[in-house]
Amino acid sequence: MSRRRTNIRYTALDDADEQQQQNDREFDEPDAFVDEQFVKPERKFPWKTVLFILFFFVAGATCLTCSILVSSGFTNEKYADRAWPLLILGILMFIPGGYYGYILLCICLKRDGFTVEDIPML
């Protein structure tokens, strides 16, 4: 047997009545919770995010339009090497701008299921 176990000192357990009285005292004290702390504060309208959404939507649409015009030959042929970068950049900007633009439009039209909380804060 291990030597460490011989140094343990056992104490008697508290009486059940004393334990019950102590528990009752704990429940009688206020717990410092206030109902107002669970109320969600009103969220401000994210104007900065709205500007980013509009910028991404307009810039993405412009890049896509320029890419289509360059690749279709409507513009000068010396700009033909810029079609693919414009297309990729336009897609990368138009998709999130269009998605959040749709959510923003639904919020402005007050459709069910769309709230300001659907738009991320920046």
Image: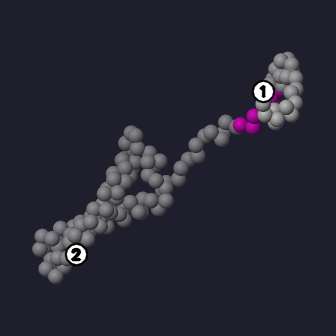
Q: Nearer the viewer, residue 16 or 97?
A: 16
Type of amino acid at the residue the image marks with label 2: Arg
Q: How is the image coloured?
A: one colour
- Secondary structure state at the residue bearing disc 1: helix
Q: Is residue 33 above or below residue 65?
A: above
Instruction: From the image, tell me which residue sits under label 1.
Output: 27
Residue 29 shown in magenta: yes
| Residue 9 pos. (x, y %) | 87, 30
Circles 2, 1 touching at the beta carbon (< 8 Å): no
Q: Nearer the viewer, residue 18 or 86?
A: 18
- Secondary structure state at the residue bearing disc 2: helix
| Residue 87 pos. (x, y %) | 24, 67
Q: Is residue 17 left or right of residue 57?
A: right
Instruction: From the image, tell me which residue sits under label 2.
Output: 82
Residue at figure coordinates x 38%, y 60% from the top left: 53
Q: Residues within 10 Å of mark 2 (few under 14, many from 20)?
A: few
Task: Give the residues drawn in magenta, as a range.
Answer: 25-33
Q: Is residue 97 left or right of residue 122?
A: left
Type of amino acid at the residue the image marks with label 1: Phe
Residue 78 in view, yes or no: yes
Q: Nearer the viewer, residue 46 or 90?
A: 90
Residue 62 in view, yes or no: no
